[in-house]
Image (cartoon, helix red, strand yellow):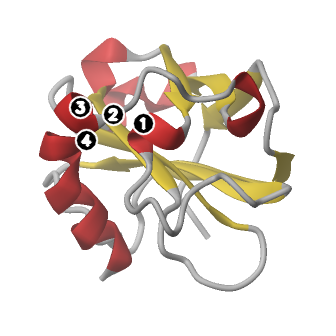
Amino acid sequence: DAIAQAEAKLGTQASAGSGAASAAVRITGRVVLAPGLTSQVAPGDTVFIYATAAQGSRMPLAIVRTTVSQLPFNFVLDESTAMNPQASLKGQTQVTLRARISSTGNAMSQPGELGVMKTPVNVGATGVELKIDGPLP
């Protein structure tokens, strides 16, 4: 699964990322959890925040991971969070953003998981709010 591959690379991305990523090839925003859902999640649950091409492959172009205890969480998706230099935000004009909570920490999505999807989002967008307010479709 594409998300599982992304998770496997997360450990190396933090140290291998480039600090010279262009501001135009990044998306910034904030992930928040709807107040009524706090009883359905645990502080240690994993939150995946990722961008996929608006059309085509669901392979993440950029991904970050945090935990519910860190919400609300300000994120930056850029070349330093890319899974693969050949498949990154660079060259994309619009993407689909997702934030998903996994109680198991598994990168593969499970039915009924809480999350949010926003599409299309322009590459270069700032201040994008992703509000997790129910299960992913």
Between the residue at mark 3 and the residue at mark 2, the CA separation in whole angstroms equals 6 Å
Q: The disc labelled 2 sits on which kind of residue?
A: Gly
* Residue named by callout 3: 14
**Residue 26 sits in which quadrant?**
top right
Horizontal and vertical percent for residue 85? 45, 59
> In this rendering, is residue 68 above or below 104?
above
Which tag is nearer the camera, tag 3 or tag 2? 2
Quarter of the image with the C terminus is bottom right
**Marking on residue 80:** 1
Residue marked by disc 2: 17
Q: Are marks 4 and 3 in contact (CB under 8 Å)?
A: yes
Q: Quadrant of residue 104?
A: bottom left
Residue type at numbered disc 4: Gln
Callout 3: SS: helix
Find out whether the residues at labels 4 and 1 contact each other: C-beta distance under 8 Å.
Answer: yes
- Amino acid type at circle 3 is Ala
Q: Within 10 angstroms of label 4, few (less than 14), some, or many (20 or more) residues? A: many
Residue depicted at x 74% and y 60%: 91
